[in-house]
Amino acid sequence: MHTPLEFTLLLLAFAVVGVVAFRMLQLPPILGYLVVGILVGPHTPGFVADSKTLHALSEFGVVFLMFSIGLEFSMPKLMSMRRIVFGLGLSQVLLSIGAVMVFGLLGAALLPRLAGITWQAAFAIGGAFAMSSTAIVSKLLAERMELETEHGRRIFGILLFQDLALVPLLILVPALVTKSDDLAYTLALALGKAVLVMVLLLFIGQKLMRWWLTLVVKRRSQELFMLNLLLITLGAAWITERAGLSLELGAFIAGMLISETQYKHQVEVDIQSFRDVLLGLFFVSVGMLLNVQVLLDNWWIVLLMLAGPIVFKFALIAGLAKFFGSSLGVSLRTGLALAQAGEFGFVLLNQAGGLKLVDPVFIQVILASMVLSMLIAPLLIAKSDAIVMRLCASEWMTQSLALTSLASRTISTQGHVIIAGFGRTGQSLAKLLEEQNIPYHALDLDPERVRDAGLAGAQVSYGDATRRESLVAAGIHRAAALVITYAETPSALRVMHFAHELAPKLPIVVRSLDGSDFEQLKEGGATEIVPEAIESSMVLALFTIRALGVPTKRVLRIIQDTRKERYASLRSYFQGADEAPEQLGRTRKHSVTLPEEARAVGQTIAELDLPSLGVDVETVRRGKEKLKPTHNMVLLAGDVLVLRGTPDCVAEAERAMLL
């Protein structure tokens, strides 16, 4: 038995090691969390985990995930998806339950081991198998920037209906067991409460949200804004839970309401840390459900119940998506993404166990197969493109036609600019290029944006700039420049890799958020890097210095000199205590005061040989005077040296000067 502190430390240590290991293997960190849950779970000898408390905490991770997904949706968008949600989603759930009931009753008749399975038990198990993992699929689609694609919208529509279906299923299962005569009344009451809550949140809440957020923002307190954000998210989740709906549905609606306000982007940034940490705990709690001993004792049944539902759900969902008008490629991707089990399936399975519908050992077998399917899900989604290409010859033909269409639109264009990403930044750039009569062609993965912008006359095509074929079709061999307008470093590096293979001398301009990835992008082949945070600070400086009476010519020269130095003096800054972990290896500034006993006192800067340690002396402050460092400058006690370098190098240089 471990104390809460010991278990927390153990969990953190395993989580850090697991996530690092899976990152190094180029595998999704979700798998690392699931494996950690298996290792520290209650079924592993030597560990006793308070899985109920952990699961209660981790559920908030799914709540915040659904909230952040809700931020990407709005009422008009949701209404436009009603055919997917209530057509495709409803069909998938009903047919999944029906199929499991048929297989369950046949199995009970043919296999003595399954003789105890009743139709009520088969109904409960069917409901559990009908669910897919909202947490895993949504997070992976968001990371792959596929939420807005055709298959992404179908996937999310089905997931949304599964969340809605959980409520009547939780009511139906115990009602079927007790053979209640009031089943119709119970369902009607639950439906009435659900409709009432949805009306309150979506219509009355929409009017209140903008007014309330504006009132909070006027107080100019980040702390108050963050507290208010948590209150809105958890409050909406509490309202839906009290009405018999899921926590996640309330959080999703709260996100949709905030998406209609001007504070959407600020909220996305603020909520991210809560979401990611708590979601990690959720995946750990899922891993804890797996009893490895049961898996080993019943391995052939587990494998059968793993492979069967995955293959069946893939075929069913892909077939339904095709029936509802999707292309074969979109249908296959939708089926692959939703073939696994889901977190709400565990809720239904636990309910079935509590009602004594299913034997406890058989429940553990089902749990094992469901957890394993969730472990496989990230791999299926990661390899979905390759699988679809292998299964669907027409998908290859469709992509070939799209590339041919793209190539035909650019074949007569010479000296054009290829714009990777046609969001706000890409569209602003395109407008400026048009005004200067410079030809361009943009690639974007949002079909709605491509269609709307194309109808408006923009030179944009649906295409993935991270694919070699798309760059060739966009005429990279004839292009004058390539501009990557989105601040996603891994994707930008992939685009630049193929761009340099195809056109080694092509100038590449890359957008960066704060310049922290400057060296990485430069090594990746970027000709010019535009860090938003630094450029905005330079514009602020321009207007500030001009307001103080400094001639514009001189101000522009200062900014030009700074750009020539590749922003070196601005990219390094003094590190704060709250520095994000991913920034700790970047160039920083650090001030070192020389006491009388310091080894560096009496030596020149050249004698210290700090460049060999990877450190530069930016300035020396002596009293109230700031001095420009020279090789022959002799250092005195009390001097303050401003060093520039990575934290490790600066720390080593500080030791060398003081000891």
Image: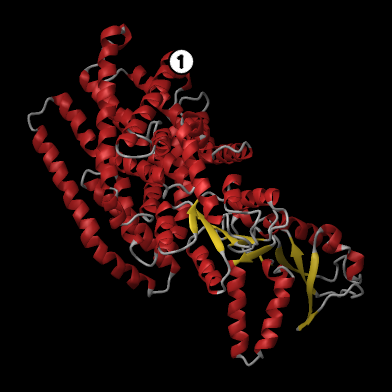
**Which residue is at the far bottom?**
549
Compared with 138, 476 (above or below) is: below
Q: Amino acid at mark 1?
A: Trp
Compared with 597, 142 (above or below) is: above
Residue lying at 71% horizontally and 74% vertically, measured from the top left: 562
Taking the image as drawn, is residue 126 in sight?
yes
Q: Quadrant of the C terminus?
A: bottom right
Between 566 and 390, the one nearer to me in the picture: 390
Residue lying at 73% horizontally and 57% vertically, measured from the top left: 505
Taking the image as drawn, is residue 355 in sight?
no
The residue tagged 1 is 299
Q: Is residue 120 left or right of residue 321?
A: left
Compared with 565, 76 (above or below) is: above
Q: Position of residue 238 (x, y in %)?
A: 28, 50
Q: Position of residue 415 (x, y in %)?
A: 63, 62
Between 265 and 33, the one nearer to me in the picture: 265
Q: Position of residue 349 (x, y in %)?
A: 31, 28
Residue lying at 51% horizontally and 70% vertically, measured from the top left: 431
Quadrant of res 117: top left
Q: Is residue 459 left or right of residue 216?
A: right
